Image: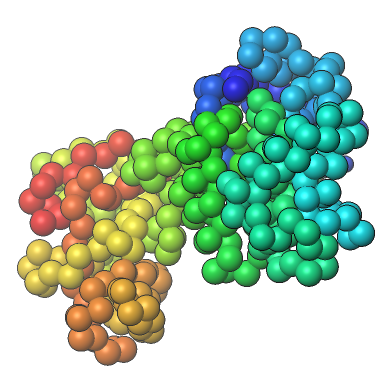
Amino acid sequence: MASIKLERLIKNYGTFRAIKGIDLDIADGAFVTFVGPSGCGKSTLLRMVAGLEEISGGTLKIDDEVVNELEPRDRDIAMVFQDYALYPHMSVAENIGFGLKMRGMEAGEISKRVKEAADILQISPLLERKPGQLSGGQRQRVAMGRAIVRRPKVYLFDEPLSNLDAKLRVDMRTQIKRLHNLLETTTIYVTHDQVEAMTLADHIVILKDGIIMQQGNPVSVYERPISRFVGEFIGSPKMNIISATVSRDSDKVNFTNEGFALSVSACEKADGQLIEVGIRPEHLIPCDKENALIAARVDVLEPLGSDTHAICLVGKQELTARLDPSLRLSPGDTLYLRAEPEKIHFFDPESGDRLEIDVPQQAAA
Ligand SMILES: Nc1ncnc2c1ncn2[C@@H]1O[C@H](COP(=O)(O)OP(=O)(O)O)[C@@H](O)[C@H]1O
Ligand SMILES: [Mg+2]
């Protein structure tokens, strides 16, 4: 078990700065996910923790000890990659135990650990097979087995499920979470898939261009995104953003656009300025015309069985509502929608930053 501390961590590739000063505290036993678009620096940051990438600046500590210069093999970390190379001529058991054998561990102990790991991963019946006789998911579990037998202080995963089909990915996700509940080993897990990041983590770190955009408990990030980028990145289908114009009358501020009207009591924006209003598809509630915030024209319906996604037009802007499938709708229908005040987010159109604006209860109800 181990805690990990990143202090002002920097990585330069020549003149390009891939990691731009990252501060992060990872508690002993935590499951942390790094998520962000391709190229944002997830793998680089993980490889710096592993010792596979030299650190250009800042400090990396494991259990309060600075390990910047420590060789990967001396960090007591096990890493699982997307492309796991298994030795084709060795059996599953030999593949799992190979690392321990190389370290000179005694055969009896290796066999005991391999059995234990195979039990945890439910691959005991496969131990005598060769990798060529396994499915993709089984091979990925063998790769995880190699990491488990080492009983390291830290597990690092770099998109380990990216090569698996959708159903298997969900199964393996559950298995990885179960594994962490059982072993309670500090884990960092890199993924570009926000659902994977949300469901696995007790602490999620959202990266963009080598910087942390937001971090915290996944639910708190979902409920209170600090920027439009995070709001749209976390949650599926993604958050609707409606652009509106600010107008003021005697005691109220109105945000309006074609098919959209919301009154708030105060806002720093001047008359005529623009504002972005964010509402998640699952937070839109069908209502009467009188109570509506939005009048949308239904364009395309996507029935999923459990719910229906209605892709609508609000004026010229597109909006998705996640609705109860029992609602009978057809393309061309007008759909009146509202949202609870605490489910309405505001962003500055220029910076993308979250704006704190109070929505009175009656305005949206
Ligand atoms: N060895 C390298 N040399 C130069 N640039 C690199 C190298 N590795 C990664 N990069 C760059 O650093 C950035 C972050 O890459 P990476 O950590 O692989 O992103 P991610 O894993 O989030 O997709 C990218 O712009 C990438 O092109
Ligand atoms: Mg990567």
In the shown orientation, is residue 180 left or right of residue 343?
right
Q: Is residue 343 left or right of residue 53?
A: left
Quadrant in which the C terminus is drawn:
bottom left
- The location of residue 136, given as percent across then percent down, is 71, 65
Q: Which colour style is shown?
A: rainbow
Residue 337: x, y in percent? 20, 67
Is residue 109 placed above or below 118 in the rendered structure? Answer: above
- Is 124 placed above or below 77 here? below
Task: State the residue at coordinates (39%, 46%).
Answer: 222
Query: In the depicted view, which residue is nearer to us: 207 or 142?
Result: 142
**Callout count:** 0
Q: Residue furthest front?
A: 108
Image x and y of residue 77, in percent: 73, 29
Q: Nearer the viewer, residue 165 or 256?
A: 165
The image quadrant that residue 333 belongs to is bottom left
Residue 116 lies, in percent from the top left, at 64, 42
**What residue is shown at x 19% (from left), y 80% (from top)?**
327
The residue drawn where x is 62% and y is 36% is 188
Residue at left 42%, top 35%? 217
Q: 236 or 292, which is in the foreground?
A: 236
Q: Can residue 124 be spotted in the picture?
A: yes
Quadrant in which the N terminus appears: top right
Vertical placement of 14 versus 236: above or below?
above
Q: Is residue 204 visible?
A: no
